[in-house]
Amino acid sequence: MSLLWSVLFGSVGLGFFVYGKKQRAVVPLVCGLTLMVFPYFVSSTILLVILGIALMALPYFFRF
């Protein structure tokens, strides 16, 4: 189950990363990079989902 969430967050992270790079927006770029990397360091599925959702919502609230 954790692998499925990791792939999902990695895919969304890639989308954020590409968007941030093209638009030269720092917050989506950093959130995308973080979404692609953080599943390697989190072993708990619940914590993985909570952090992933928080990182996906972050660019919506902080628009720089």
Image: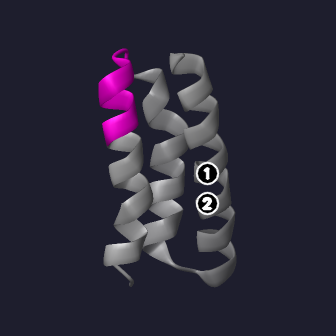
Does any portion of residue 20 appear in the rendered image?
yes
- Is residue 42 at least partly visible in the picture? no
Q: Is residue 22 above or below residue 6?
A: below
Residue range highlighted in magenta: 43-50
As rendered, which of 20 and 59 lies closer to the eye?
A: 59
Q: Which residue is mark 1?
A: 12
Give the residue displayed 69% in from the left and 64% down from the top: 18
Q: Amino acid at mark 1?
A: Val
Q: Is 1 on the left or on the right of 48, as rendered?
A: right
Question: Residue at left 39%, top 35%?
Answer: 49
Is residue 48 covered in magenta? Answer: yes
| Residue 52 drawn at (x, y percent) | 41, 43
Instruction: Say which mark, if any, is on residue 17.
Output: 2
Q: Position of residue 16 (x, y in %)?
A: 59, 62
Q: Nearer the viewer, residue 5 or 13?
A: 5
Q: Quadrant of the C terminus?
A: bottom left
